[in-house]
Image (spheres, rainbow, N blue to C red):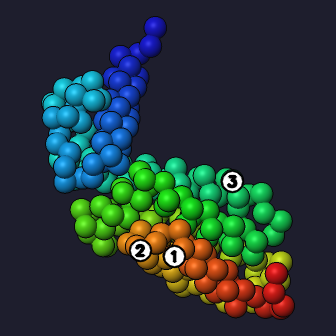
Amino acid sequence: MEPAGNKHARRSRETRAALVAAARELFAERGYADVGTEEIVRAAGVTRGALYHQFRDKADLFDATVQTVEAELTERIAGGVMADAVDPVVALKAGARAFLDAFAEPDVERILLLDAPGVLGWRRWREIGQEHGLGVIAAALEAAMANGALGRRPVEPLAHVLLGALDEAALLVAHSDDPAATRAEVADTLDHLLDGLLARGER
């Protein structure tokens, strides 16, 4: 028999996951401002009290939703195209393009780009992005420097600059009148930016 404490913890995790999943779907469909907590709890199949046991308010639930989407996006890119790349520089380029492509998905774009900066504030939005993406970029840069593809330089500031460039690129695409064309232009620009970091030649 499952101990009472473990059962309580499991149910709490399940409730939290159900709320985040329901909120994610609703926020993606209509945006943060047009979704109420009552419909979130109905969609999650839990009580209003359960929501406030897990989260302070709707904004706190949205914060958790943003973290979930960001974590999934980072894992998908780091464990997918970047892991399959033949070398670290190719991995960085592939990761940058996959990052931009992901924001063509309505739920990712709406939650991470259109709503998160305004709802959470710029500082918190950047913190979440750094928590999930900065380490991936830094690891790829370290690997590129280790194999001689990039000249040795401080990794942390370079990783921050590249993450900032990716965020700005994604925002530019999200607010463009022609997202597909802008995405292609921005992806090409990021490729040239990464090529400029190469210690020797171009790939």
Residue at image mark 2: 176
Q: Is residue 47 left or right of residue 126?
A: left
Gap in angstroms between the C-alphas marked 2 and 1: 7 Å
**In the image, residue 103 lies at what x, y percent?**
49, 61
Q: Amino acid at mark 3?
A: Gly
Q: Residue at x 41, y 51 (%)?
A: 107
Residue at image mark 1: 182
Residue in the foreground of this view, choosing between 196 and 143: 196
Q: Nearer the viewer, mark 2 or mark 3?
A: 2
Question: Disc 2 vs disc 1: Cβ atoms closer than 8 Å?
Answer: yes
**In the image, residue 89 lies at what x, y percent?**
75, 75
Quadrant holding the C terminus: bottom right
Q: Residue at x 20, y 45 (%)?
A: 35
Residue in the foreground of this view, choosing between 49 and 107: 107
Secondary structure beneath label 1: helix
Q: Residue at x 27, y 24 (%)?
A: 45
Q: Amino acid at mark 1?
A: Thr
**Does any portion of residue 67 appear in the rendered image?**
no
Gap in angstroms between the C-alphas marked 2 and 3: 27 Å
Question: Disc 1 vs disc 3: Cβ atoms closer than 8 Å?
Answer: no
**Sequence-first disc among 1 and 3:** 3
With respect to residue 157, does 133 lie above or below?
A: above
The answer to which quarter of the image holds residue 140 is bottom right
Q: Is residue 117 left or right of residue 161?
A: left
Q: Which mark is residue 80?
A: 3
